[in-house]
Amino acid sequence: MARTSDIETAASVLRDGGLVAIPTETVYGLGANAEDPAAVARIFHVKGRPPSHPLIVHIGGAEQLAEWVEEVPATARLLAEHFWPGPLTLVLRRGRRVPLEATGGLETVAVRVPDHPLTLALLSAFGGGVTAPSANRFGSVSPTTSDHVRAELGDAVDFVLDGGPCEVGVESTIVDVTGEIPSILRPGGVSREDLEAVLGYPLAVPTTSSVRVPGQHPSHYAPRARVVLVEPEKVIAEAQSAQEHGHQVGVLLPAPFADAPVKAHFVVALPDSMAAYARGLYGFLRELDRQGCDLIIASLPPEDGLGLAIANRLRRAAGPRPSPGNAQQ
Ligand code: TXA
Ligand code: MG
């Protein structure tokens, strides 16, 4: 875990235009000074991410929001008051302080206040905004520990602020509040039900296939192994048949079947609680890759609460992969 002096080191790396891996409650981010276009450009280079894919600006408190956006609509204020610090990202009209490099050329900007004591301390010591995507190579599984970050990015990141394993485990919920009615662009750590309870009206559920903004491709959050989704009660039979066909099969075994025998190369018995499932999800996928699985059999959880975000990530992990030679890594 990081010490107090690490906060100072991280802040000075940011001031010098360097990259710092930051712990958040969702996943680790690859952070740079949001107002330094050259540092922001390095993020895209290190991640292998197309420059048209917008980033999230992380700020130290809801009271700073007005500094980063053109205006703060009442809905945005309401949601920020309820959910920040926390796993909610708001998309608003871009303020002049935000360079177009950080928004992928868009006139809107995504902003959030992360709920992690070390990153809040860093934001306070640094004094500015930190723009950060998840600290993984473009298209792959997000990191939920500092070891994941080091394993994936190595020396490409100047400093890793070690804040322990991430509590939530899936990325923030992204809500576009630029229009009349807010819309969920990406389900995440704040559930649709919690948003609706605060807003007082229902929100539409995004479909995985609708690519709303750059950076939301069908195949994302993907391990190396191919992911195949089947009905929960078919997971065991599918795994066995694939194993018999010579695959190195990894299984995400739904909680109700946790005690059943499964013939597969490696089996992860999923926890009962959706919070524990979300917290572990990316670690499970990484572990199945590490074990040498070439095929992962999984099923979708019920799509309420955190289950909506888990199902979204599994669908994307199972989405069609780009052909070799494409930009995705
Ligand atoms: O939990 C999280 O959100 C993590 C931590 C590090 O904060 N960050 C994260 O960043 O997941 P990233 O870059 O992996 O995903 C950011 C998403 C992208 O899908 C991008 O399309 C969307 O945010 N986004 C960013 N700016 C946007 C904008 N102006 N309009 C619409 N979507 C935007
Ligand atoms: Mg990401």
Image: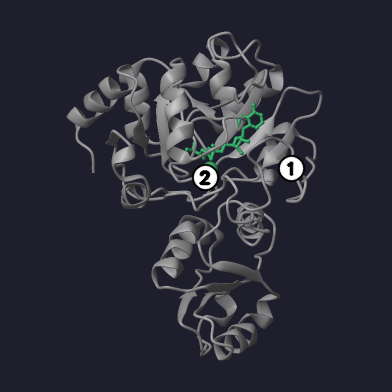
Q: Residue furthest top?
A: 96
**CA separation in Å, label 2 and label 1:** 16 Å
In this view, the mark in front (2 or 1)? 2
Mark closer to the chain start, 2 or 1: 2
**Residue 276 in sight:** no
Q: Is residue 6 above or below residue 277?
A: above
At 58% across and 32% down in the image, what residue appears? 89
Front-most of 24 and 314?
A: 314
Q: Position of residue 227 (x, y in %)?
A: 60, 67
**What amino acid does circle 1 point to?**
Val
Q: For this view, does 115 lie left or right of residue 201?
A: left
Above-or-below relation of 190 to 127: below
Residue 196 locus on image (x, y percent)? 72, 39
In the rendered image, which quarter is residue 255 located in? bottom right
Q: Nearer the viewer, residue 61 or 322?
A: 322
Can you tell which quarter of the image residue 70 is in? Answer: top right
Residue at 48 percent across and 75 percent down: it is 269
Q: Secondary structure at mark 1?
A: loop
Amino acid at pointer 2: Phe
Taking depth in this image into account, of 323 and 245 the one nearest to the observer is: 323
Badge 2 marks a residue whose secondary structure is loop
Q: Residue at x 55, y 30 (%)?
A: 55
Question: On the image, numbered disc 2 is attached to which residue?
Answer: 138
Q: Residues within 10 Å of mark 1 (few under 14, many from 20)?
A: few
Would you name the residue on which mark 1 appears?
211
> What residue is at 54 percent from the left and 15 percent from the top?
99
Q: Position of residue 138 (x, y in %)?
A: 52, 45
Around disc 2, counting alpha carbons within 10 Å, would you say few (fewer than 14), some (14 to 19), or many (20 or more)? many
Which percent across, then down, holds residue 314? 62, 60
Q: Are marks 2 and 1 in contact (CB under 8 Å)?
A: no
